Image (spheres, rainbow, N blue to C red):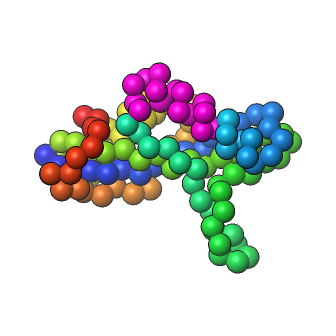
Amino acid sequence: MSNYHVVMEAAWLVRDVEDIDDAIGVDGSESGRRLNEADKEYVDVEVGLTDCPACGEPFDSAFIAASTALVGLVLEIDIFNAENEEHATRIAKSEVGGALRDVPLEVIQTVETEEGDEGASAE
């Protein structure tokens, strides 16, 4: 059995917002609340970054049209005692997906970690 650090991307829809800062604030509050209610406070949540197609500089992954925002989140979780990388990604998607119902998730990175690494776990 091995330990893994799994990074996922989520697409979060926020309605009735006027600007990017509002969308990110509502998004962070709502996603955090849902994870905490499901006892998943060990999942790290941050707003993702998107590279500007013109200059290449990163900016917050959020877009608003018609007072509705799509915010890209990055969710990170440590998985302990998984059989392999595929098993770790299934566990991670199940843990996070159960709390964030109807939120599209995509695994973007899975890294095997050392057995001695400390941190919160999901099994």
80 w.r.t. 29: above or below? below
83 left or right of 24 in image: left
Q: Main secondary structure of the magenta part?
A: helix
Q: Residue at the location (72% across, 41% down)?
A: 23
Q: Position of residue 96 (x, y in %)?
A: 43, 35
Decide whether residue 31 is among the magenta residues: yes
Q: Is residue 13 visible?
A: no
Q: Is residue 35 left or right of residue 2?
A: right
Q: Position of residue 86 (x, y in %)?
A: 29, 49
Q: Which residues are magenta?
A: 27-41
Q: Is 33 or 122 nearer to us in this picture?
A: 33
At a point 22% along the width and 42% down the height, the residue shown is: 80
Does the magenta-highlighted stretch encompass residue 16? no
Give the side of residue 108 with respect to residue 115, left or right: right
Residue 114 rendering spot, x and y as whole percentages: 18, 56
Residue at 62% across, 62% down: 50
Q: Quadrant of the C terminus?
A: top left
Left/right placement of residue 71 relative to residue 87 reads right
